[in-house]
């Protein structure tokens, strides 16, 4: 095949958000590799700085810019690419591509769309067109009508009959969708949805039908295959992103499997898709009738999962097909000898389990349904359903040791568990476990949940065997059977009331060990050089022999709030450096949305649990020279000491020193010895003790459990009442689970140092500054590099303190230090002896790869050098990416609990340029005219006065709520007064909201959790898709930047241009 | 319970079928669904089948009720389990499906077929891949003297064993098709029955040459095609009469042998639902770039040697993975055959058009 392409523009997916996560780093980087193999120059546009795809050495040119029509047009004008790829950056890239086509930009600059034509994408995105196209080939779709306004929607619902399903068109992950029971409910939802989408769909209700998906690949010569099918364990009514999913399907007969497969191929051919797509079905469990739900004409979360589940490199193949190759021309890169035109045969099964983090949001509804709320997922591989289910539950890292209740969910032990089986919440699988323990029948759980009996029988097997273990001696037979059912040593230990080590010792004495199996895409039919491995107890023979000169890297596990693509980036960098240093690499990870689990990233990939038991299994088999625990975030970090105690060599900082930083008492003493200040704190084990301590330290206080990553259950208490309230809810408080009460410092600034040390000596560091004051979680802060407001003296002091701590902890490898600066006082609030979330940011902004340096330091190489990291020629700003629109009910304001799901970063010649671009990259739109201001508290009003003046001096029209309006009028600033929503007086905020371009709402004090006029405005802003600022410092910075940038324009400069 | 291979290796597991000892040829199948169809496929006669997909029995087995007169069997590929024995990694005792009336174990026991679960089927498959198919035996209890021997099922005429004794007719259409049943899967019959056809299903050695018919279909079937001297003679006679012929699987081998080409035994055969086959246009040499590629269902241990095709014949399909022959056709006469199963069941239905094309071509006759 021939193509004449010289330069291709690839659109990325931007910051990670619910419904669009790390899977697009995987698909984008595979696409880049496929293009580079063809010697095509690749221009990548993606503001997600924590991705692998934006690394140096992948794309030729990278633009860290907002994925908007405006910036994309500028990039096209400047770069003049021959063609553009739209299907590798999720719905964001697809929508942007459609907009560029519609505006004529692509035609004007002669840019060809590769792969699926735009007209075909439209056919799949516009519901009416879609139904019409499928009707042409007699493929059934759900009875559905599109509506462009409330009247049409209500008419459609009346016609189809309640309950109906409402879906928002053009929305990733089914945003704004749900089942609606009657006219009132529908009218209420419609007004909200029509703010962010031009049309809705009213559909026939298919709740309870089986949900099945196929991943389909088609080339320009009309060869068409299905790479994988998947069955949702949760039936229709629960979004596929919220469902437990198995591949291949388990309860479909041959006839059903192949009937749906045939329809998939017929549909995709008829539509004319070139490349990869996903087709979703509802299949009636009794009549076997079906409906096509939707077709996604692009790489998706499901396709990333399918790719990891089968070993078939879907994104790579899709990119080659977009260039014009045909399937038979592409080799199966797993076997190296067979063709890519085949359908993988699995000799194992996989289970995907979603990971939620709704606990981070006050007032967030815990129910799951047709809208996606999960923030990450895990994938377990095994050879029985029980095995993969229990593996997956451990992989989630929510405290479950298998199909049994985590300590935090003991409330499910009562009869209430059946309610959560019927009305699904994020804990439904555990509610089922609890129900089986109460001897609820399979039939009853089936009736309550709609989950197929087959899956439920398997779940019951686990619970029954648990009873067997508790009643019988732990002999060889019982142990063997338990391991085949996926029980962990820790789980068995709990049942037998002994410790985990003795179970492991006994098991090894009985010679019951897991075997290593390969994933080879052909179920063993052809010899394959595959490095893709998993462990199972359903086997007698290893597929591989232990490797030589190996180093293992522990991955980050599921994405959740606080641990995301940045740790995957760090792991990938570590793998690259290890390889460059002549080591063979082993990657261990459980997250299918990652690049680190790609087939070509490591010499051996174990798609496995990040638990002590499993890592010991792997390490005892492979005997690597060392294990890297410092690049995968908190999960591997927490394993360091345990592995060390099991005589496993950990590279870098000695795990006992890591523990000295993790253990609050030890670390605090260390700081005292070094003469370094820290906020006052005390560990308490009872509510009365907590109250006493809080009085002593003085309110406000910060309340939190030890060993936290992202502020799980963290809270600021301003008085005794809030403190008690919170402690009552945070249930677990005991001598084993103490709670830390520390002084919450107000009006202080936060700075961070990310760096690398070698044998206790600082090698490189970068200092970043938060725009928001302390009180905003560092993961939710807007971060600037180089610092703009921090005094040189403060920087010097921070560096001195850092050096002292590094020396004391004898750090070798990456570290992160967080400080609070107030009135010339510098206090240490955190020290992480591992890579932090800002490592990709500081690496890409300074031009020095911190993980590369850290990895070489861990290998004992000399990493000293003269690295320039403070005086830079440009400014970069990193902004949090929030997903509040997905978390119904949550108050969209930042606090000590982290709430963002991702981040973006942009460069600028000035701070203001970088800040505006960065905020826009996170979805912020610059205001045109109307701005609503609502400032709580006297202090904030006074401090923001200058900012308000700036705003009113420019073209903007100010609106303000009662007190704010009065204050502004007194200060001589013109503004229109609006009455609070609760007052019902006119002119009212609720009527005016629709006209606002920006809402600045500064709450009086840190998060209290109750519903107020402020929280209603904030929530409405999110639901109505109006840009919102809730932090005073960010409001100041934003308005100042807006004023400064007036007329200057935001430049579309590449990363390279900023670096040179 | 044990599976013992001729090379001496032993795989232990638990019995879930009939309590019997059987010898057989051990082969593996990589399909992920379709055990009901595979187990009742007569081409598996004499074979101990290893399923590489670990979970088997999930959706149970449909009702055993016989098809009404004049109709092919509805739920199965023949009236009974044809395999000699079954080997799986994990038999799923519980099953769930609206069509299911029995568990797989019940079916196996009722059919007197032994089965073993708990075997490392991947290790076993790799062994078979490296050594080629092997003789083996399933031993339920203590081996009895009579089953101590390994027995190559291909030494006997398996086709004669699975072929029906009597002929049967379906439909009343004007186009009369003789379907030579060498162990024909029911879905071939189902695929041929249309308003315009009358399908007469005849035993493997039935001499149809003096019957009145418009076309001949050669079915799939078990074992070594060179054992089928009698039908090959009949096929040659049909060719002399210029009768349109379509062969499937064993039918491909029989047509090739009738044409004068030769067959050979594959090391471990093709038994799966994901075999890519490239359709060759105008007999052009294998070029993956231009050919259309189909995903096919397969079950065969023997193959046609494409290089031995005589003048006038060409390869129709070849396997995209190993280049082996997947179909032949005559350049000018209405004779063609495929090595894979266009009737699927189990497996993908991508090549069902082969039946449509064949029957359409008969309308023009």
Image (cartoon, rainbow, N blue to C red):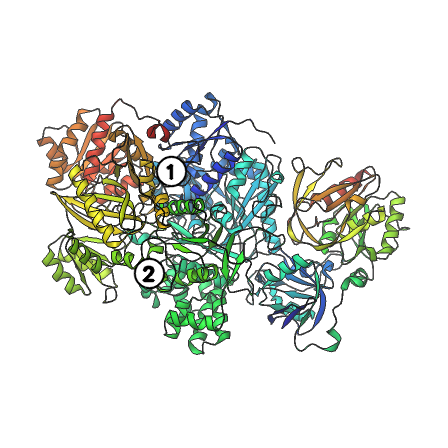
Q: Position of residue B214 (x, y in %)?
A: 84, 45
Residue A893 can be seen in this image: no
Please tell me which of labels 2 and 1 falls first in the chain: 1
Q: Position of residue A425 (x, y in %)?
A: 37, 56
Q: Which residue is mark 2?
A: A641
Q: Position of residue A970 (x, y in %)?
A: 8, 31
Residue B165 can be seen in this image: yes
In this rendering, would B113 be left or right of B168?
left
> Chain ID for label 1?
A
Please name whichever residue, B44 or A49, is drawn nearer the observer in this view of the structure: A49
Quadrant containing the C terminus of chain B in the rendered view: top right
Q: Residue at x 36, y 50 (%)?
A: A860
Asked if disc 2 and disc 1 are in contact, CB closer than 8 Å, the reply is no
> Chain ID for label 2?
A
Label at residue A14: 1
Please name whichever residue, A409 or A782, is drawn nearer the observer in this view of the structure: A782
């Amino acid at each position: 095949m021939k193509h004449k392409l010289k330069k291709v523009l690839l659109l990325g997916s931007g910051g990670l958000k619910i419904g669009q996560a790390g899977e697009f780093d995987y698909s984008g980087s595979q696409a880049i590799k496929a293009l580079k193999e063809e010697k095509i120059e690749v221009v990548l546009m993606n503001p997600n700085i924590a991705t692998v795809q934006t690394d140096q050495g992948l794309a030729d040119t990278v633009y860290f810019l907002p994925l908007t029509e405006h910036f994309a047009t500028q990039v096209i004008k400047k770069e003049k690419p021959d063609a553009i790829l739209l299907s590798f950056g999720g719905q964001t890239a697809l929508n942007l591509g459609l907009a560029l086509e519609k505006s004529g930009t692509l035609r004007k600059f002669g840019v060809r769309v590769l792969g699926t034509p735009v007209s075909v994408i439209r056919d799949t995105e516009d519901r009416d067109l879609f139904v019409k196209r499928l009707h042409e080939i007699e493929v059934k779709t759900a009875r559905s009508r599109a509506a462009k306004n409330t009247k049409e929607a209500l008419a459609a619902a009346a016609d189809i009959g309640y309950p109906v399903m409402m879906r928002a068109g053009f929305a990733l992950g089914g945003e704004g969708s749900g089942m609606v029971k009657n006219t009132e409910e529908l009218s209420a939802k419609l007004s909200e949805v029509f703010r962010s989408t031009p049309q809705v769909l009213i559909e026939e209700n298919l709740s309870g039908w089986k949900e099945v998906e196929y991943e389909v690949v088609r080339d320009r010569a009309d060869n068409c295959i299905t790479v994988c099918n998947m069955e949702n364990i949760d039936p229709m009514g629960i979004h596929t992103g919220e469902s437990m999913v198995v591949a291949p399907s388990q309860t479909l007969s041959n006839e059903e499997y192949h009937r749906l497969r045939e329809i998939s191929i017929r549909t995709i051919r008829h539509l004319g898709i070139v490349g990869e797509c996903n087709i979703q079905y509802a299949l009636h469990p009794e009549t076997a009738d079906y409906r096509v739900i939707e077709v996604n004409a692009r790489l998706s979360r499901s396709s990333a999962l399918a790719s990891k589940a089968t070993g078939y490199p879907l994104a790579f193949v899709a990119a080659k097909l977009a260039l014009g190759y045909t399937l038979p021309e592409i080799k199966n890169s797993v076997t190296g000898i067979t063709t890519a035109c085949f359908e993988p045969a699995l000799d194992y099964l996989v289970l995907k389990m979603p990971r939620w983090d709704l606990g981070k949001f006050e007032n967030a509804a815990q129910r799951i349904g047709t809208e996606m709320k999960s923030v990450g997922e895990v994938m377990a591989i095994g050879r029985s359903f029980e095995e993969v289910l229990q593996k997956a539950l451990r992989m989630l890292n929510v405290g479950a040791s298998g199909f049994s209740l985590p300590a935090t969910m003991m409330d499910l032990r009562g009869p209430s568990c059946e309610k959560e089986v019927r009305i699904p919440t994020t804990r439904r699988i555990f509610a089922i476990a609890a129900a089986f323990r109460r001897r609820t029948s399979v039939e009853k759980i089936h009736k309550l949940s709609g989950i197929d009996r087959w899956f439920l029988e398997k779940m019951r097997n686990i619970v029954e065997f648990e009873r067997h273990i508790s009643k019988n001696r732990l002999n060889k037979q019982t142990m063997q059977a338990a391991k085949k059912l996926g029980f962990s040593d820790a789980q068995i230990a709990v049942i037998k009331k002994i410790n985990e080590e003795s179970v492991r010792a006994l098991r090894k004495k009985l010679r019951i060990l897991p075997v290593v199996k390969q994933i080879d895409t052909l179920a063993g039919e052809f010899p394959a050089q595959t490095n893709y491995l998993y462990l199972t107890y359903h086997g007698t023979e290893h597929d591989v022999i232990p490797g030589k000169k190996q180093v293992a890297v522990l991955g980050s596990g599921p994405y959740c709030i606080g641990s995301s693509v940045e740790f995957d980036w760090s792991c990938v960098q570590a793998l690259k450096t290890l390889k460059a240093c002549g080591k063979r690499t082993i990657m261990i990870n459980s997250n299918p949305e990652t690049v680190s689990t790609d087939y070509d990233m490591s010499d051996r990939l174990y798609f496995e649990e990040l638990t002590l038991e499993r890592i010991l299994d792997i390490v005892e088999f492979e005997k690597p020279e060392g294990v890297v625990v410092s690049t995968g975030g908190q999960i591997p970090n927490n394993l360091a000491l345990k592995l060390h105690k099991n005589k496993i060599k950990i590279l870098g900082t000695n795990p006992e020193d890591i523990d000295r930083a993790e253990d609050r008492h030890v670390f605090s003493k260390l700081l005292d010895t070094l003469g370094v200040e820290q906020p006052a704190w005390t560990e308490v084990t009872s509510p009365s003790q907590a109250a006493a301590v809080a009085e002593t330290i003085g309110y406000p206080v910060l309340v939190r459990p030890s060993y936290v990553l992202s502020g799980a259950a963290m809270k600021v208490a301003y008085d005794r009442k809030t403190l008690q309230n919170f402690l009552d809810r945070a249930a677990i408080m005991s001598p084993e689970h103490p709670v830390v009460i520390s002084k919450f410092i107000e009006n202080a600034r936060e700075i961070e140092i990310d760096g690398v040390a070698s044998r206790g000596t600082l090698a490189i560091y970068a200092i970043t500054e938060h725009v928001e004051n302390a009180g905003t979680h560092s993961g939710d802060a807007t971060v600037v590099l180089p610092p703009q407001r921090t005094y040189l003296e403060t920087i010097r002091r921070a560096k001195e303190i850092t050096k002292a701590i590094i020396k004391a902890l004898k750090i070798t490898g990456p570290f992160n230090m967080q400080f609070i600066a107030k009135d010339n006082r510098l206090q240490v609030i955190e020290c992480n002896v591992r890579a932090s979330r800002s490592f990709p940011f500081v690496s890409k902004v300074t031009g020095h790869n911190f993980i590369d340096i850290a990895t070489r330091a861990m290998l004992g190489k000399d990493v000293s050098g003269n690295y320039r990291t403070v005086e830079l020629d440009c400014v970069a700003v990193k902004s949090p990416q929030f997903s509040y629109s997905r978390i119904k009910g949550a108050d969209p304001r930042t606090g000590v609990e982290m709430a963002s799901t991702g981040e973006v970063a942009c460069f600028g010649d000035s701070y203001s340029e970088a800040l505006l671009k960065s905020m826009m990259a996170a979805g912020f739109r610059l205001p045109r005219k109307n701005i609503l201001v609502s400032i709580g508290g006297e202090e904030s009003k006074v401090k923001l006065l200058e900012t308000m003046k700036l705003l009113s001096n420019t073209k903007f029209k100010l609106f303000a709520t009662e007190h704010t309006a009065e204050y502004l009028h007194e200060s001589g600033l013109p503004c229109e007064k609006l009455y609070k929503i609760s007052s019902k007086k006119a002119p009212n905020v609720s009527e005016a909201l629709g006209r606002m371009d920006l809402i600045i709402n500064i709450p009086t004090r840190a998060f209290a959790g109750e519903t107020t006029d402020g929280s209603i405005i904030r929530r409405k802003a999110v639901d109505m898709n109006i840009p919102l600022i809730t932090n005073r410092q960010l409001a100041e910075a934003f308005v100042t930047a807006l004023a400064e940038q007036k007329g200057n324009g935001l430049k579309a400069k590449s990363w390279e241009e900023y670096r040179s | 319970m044990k599976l013992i291979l001729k090379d001496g290796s032993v795989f232990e597991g638990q019995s879930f079928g009939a309590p019997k000892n059987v010898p057989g040829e051990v082969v593996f199948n990589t399909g992920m669904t379709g055990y009901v169809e595979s187990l009742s496929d007569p081409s598996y006669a004499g074979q101990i089948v290893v399923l590489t997909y670990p979970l088997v029995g999930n959706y149970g087995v449909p009702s055993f009720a016989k098809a009404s007169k004049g109709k092919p069997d509805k739920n199965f590929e023949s009236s009974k389990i044809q395999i000699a024995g079954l080997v799986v990694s994990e038999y799923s005792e519980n099953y769930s499906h609206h069509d299911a009336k029995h568990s797989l174990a019940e079916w196996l026991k009722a059919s007197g077929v032994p089965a073993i679960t708990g075997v490392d089927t991947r290790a076993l498959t790799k062994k078979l891949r490296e050594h080629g198919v092997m003789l083996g035996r399933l031993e339920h209890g203590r081996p009895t003297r009579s089953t101590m021997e390994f027995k190559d099922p291909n030494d006997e005429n398996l086709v004669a064993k699975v072929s029906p004794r009597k002929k049967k007719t379906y439909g009343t259409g004007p186009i009369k098709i003789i379907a030579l049943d060498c162990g024909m899967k029911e879905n071939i019959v189902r695929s041929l029955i249309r308003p315009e056809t009358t399908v007469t299903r005849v035993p493997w050695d039935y001499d149809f040459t003096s019957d009145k018919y418009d076309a001949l279909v050669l079915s799939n079937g078990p074992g070594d095609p060179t054992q089928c001297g009698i039908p090959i003679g009949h096929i040659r006679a049909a060719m002399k009469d210029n009768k349109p012929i379509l062969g499937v699987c064993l039918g491909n081998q029989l047509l090739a042998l009738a044409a004068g080409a030769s067959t050979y035994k594959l090391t471990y055969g093709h038994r799966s639902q994901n075999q890519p086959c490239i359709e060759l246009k105008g007999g052009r040499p294998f070029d993956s770039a231009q050919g259309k590629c189909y995903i096919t269902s397969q079950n065969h241990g023997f193959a046609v040697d494409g290089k031995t095709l005589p003048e006038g014949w060409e390869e129709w399909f070849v396997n995209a993975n190993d280049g082996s022959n997947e179909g032949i056709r005559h350049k000018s006469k209405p004779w063609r055959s495929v090595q894979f199963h266009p009737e699927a069941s189990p497996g993908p239905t991508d090549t069902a058009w082969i039946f449509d094309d064949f029957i359409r071509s008969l309308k023009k006759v």
